[in-house]
Image (cartoon, rainbow, N blue to C red):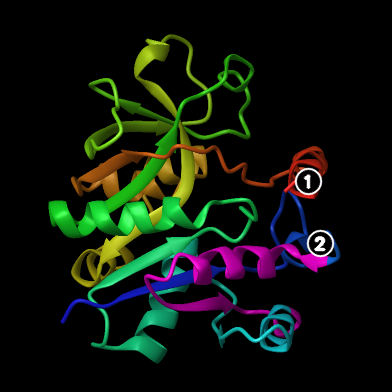
Amino acid sequence: MKNTAIIIPSRLKAKRFPNKPLVKINNVPMIIHVLNRAKESKIGEVCVATPDDEIFQAVKKNGGKAILTKENHLSGSDRVYEAYTKELGNNVDLIINLQGDMPNIKPNSISKLEKLMRINKCDIGTLASHIGNNDIADPNIVKVEIDEMLKDNDFLHAKDFFRTKKVFNDKKIYHHIGIYAFTNIALTKYVKLARSKLEIERNLEQMRALENNLIIRVGLSDSLPLGIDTKEDLEKVSKEMKLL
């Protein structure tokens, strides 16, 4: 069995930008843009995992599949796991957690991650892109540190993830992209772990994996999809998407 599913966790009560999944870009809710990019990757079934009926109804109205989940999940991956166990069971061996705030992610970035996971047969994978000088000090932009320079077809071990850092060699620091690929075994193991110290301190769910010695590999994306965490991010992405 080699089937892939993309599950997009989405909720209205985000602390930094409440209700952002339903904010419209070019008259389309942001979550629908993400859903459509996932479908365009053509790598498997796509669904949205949400505790909110408003998101559920918006997805259904736009021809997508949505799964209602519990409210009180500690991370997006925990929400993805509930949707996986409810609807997918043993039908898939690879689950992609695609963050619901990246409406401009390219479908070929999603399919590239799936390909890297299949070739390398690792537990958890993610993507990164080259970082701009203005982004290094921005705490809203998550960075990933790698021991080596990341080239196009590499899939290298992540050393650390962070928002701010006092000293680092920026040649090995990349802009982390909010997408994770888990084998079904790794996702099941991940959600059974307690929230880790750095996961809580940095508000980064991937630290739970690193602090429990789960290996995360990183591939290079040829584009830089911006996660929308603020209204300024929304304005920037909206302008970019109007040009497409």
As for residue 51 lying within the magenta part, the answer is: yes
Amino acid type, mark 2 = Val
The residue drawn where x is 28% and y is 66% is 187
Residue 90 is situated, as x and y percent measured from the top left of the image, at: 23, 87
Q: What segment is highlighted magenta in the picture? A: 28-54
Taking the spot 54% from the left edge, 82% from the top edge, the residue there is 69
Viewer-proximal residue among 137 and 152: 152
Seen in the image, is 107 located left or right of residue 197?
Answer: right
Disc ID at residue 170: none
Residue at horizontal 51 percent and vertical 72 percent from the top: 39
Q: Nearer the viewer, residue 92 or 161?
A: 92
Q: Could you say which quadrant of the image residue 61 lies in? A: bottom right
Q: Residue at (56%, 86%) from the top-left corner?
A: 65
Residue 163 position in % (x across, y down): 52, 30
Identify the residue at the far right of this view. 27
Label 2: few (<14), some (14–19) or many (≥20) C-alpha neighbours in 10 Å:
some
